[in-house]
Image (cartoon, helix red, strand yellow):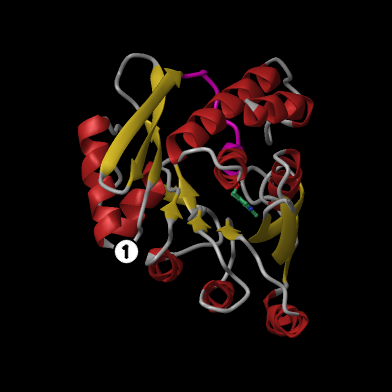
Amino acid sequence: MRSKRVLTVQDISCFGQCSLTVALPVLSATGIETVILPTAVLSTHTAGFKGFTFRDLSEDIPSIIAHWKKEGLKFDGLYTGYLGSKADIDYVKEIAKSELLNGPIIIDPCFGDHGKLYGLFDEEYVKEVRSLCDGADFLLPNITEACYLLGIDYIGRVDEEKANELIQGLIKMGAKNVVLKGLSNGKGTIGVAVSNNEKVEFYFHEKLDKDYHGTGDVFASVFVGAYMNGKTPFEAVKIASNFVYECISSTIGDDDHPYGVEFEPRLGDLIAMIAK
Ligand code: PXL
């Protein structure tokens, strides 16, 4: 049996352990054939670095799509992360409804955190991402992104009840299922809510006292890999949460490593989690 083939569309941040430098190794470790469509090349990610370069690759995308169509390529899933422009969002929509895709659409909105938008984005971009979420099989926002997508003020602390409300709003907006990250129930834990058709389930675990950039990308990539391997959405959330926890604990002692998580030495554990 051939392995599943997933197309992931996001930027290449050359340095910084996020977007494609995470998605590609993580998905490969889960046994997924990974096809990439880079939307831009940046010297580093945009959080915590100044003066980064940004080369927009959007112009190349139409001919890449046309070539893939000509070759009759097929993808079993589509996973998007940090895109970068309205044009990229339009191309993703085109791929999603084309003959290239025969499988789930998994969208990580990837435009903000901690109540704020990432540096290069504005409300106009949020509006475009909103339209991309319509019809997504899984939408994976953090609390900031959920609030922006719903057009409401940022809610600092989201418990199970509030999470349910946000999820119902996002489903009304057009997402079929939602994985909402970053919940807190006030007991030193962090949690994820996952809706699967009508049902919402929660997974909480101990919160580590340090935030790292790129953990959303690690989470989303593991979720996609696990789900495409036949795990239920809830199992995929558990594996992704536990893996991110492991990666953060590995990185915490390393003061020279503030820009991302050291996920690479843990990939063996991920392979074992998927095989279980
Ligand atoms: O991890 C999300 C991400 C991806 N790519 C770039 C980013 C960010 C978040 O800031 O700047 C370029």
Identify the residue at horizontal 45%, vertical 64% (top origin): 122
Q: Is residue 270 magenta?
A: no
- The answer to whether 122 is drawn above or below residue 213 in the figure is below
Q: Quadrant of residue 42?
A: bottom right
Which residue is drawn at the image coordinates 73% and 51% (left, top)? Answer: 1
In the rendered image, residue 256, in percent from the top left (x then y), is placed at: 77, 25
Tag 1 residue: 174
In the figure, 70 relative to 25: above or below? below
Q: Is residue 3 left or right of residue 236?
A: right
| Magenta stretch: dominant secondary structure | loop
Q: Return the residue nearer the eye: 260 or 219.
A: 219
Magenta-tinted stretch: 207-217
* Percent x, y of residue 36: 73, 61
**Frontmost residue, 207 versus 133:** 133
In the image, residue 69 above or below residue 263: below
Residue 61: give x, y in percent of width and height: 70, 78
Q: Is residue 229 visible?
A: yes
Residue at image coords 71%, 66% = 37
**Quadrant hosting residue 149:** bottom left
Which secondary structure, mark 1? loop
Q: Amino acid at mark 1?
A: Gly
Packing grade of label 1 (10 A; few <14, some 14-19, many >=20) is some
Image x and y of residue 79, in percent: 58, 57
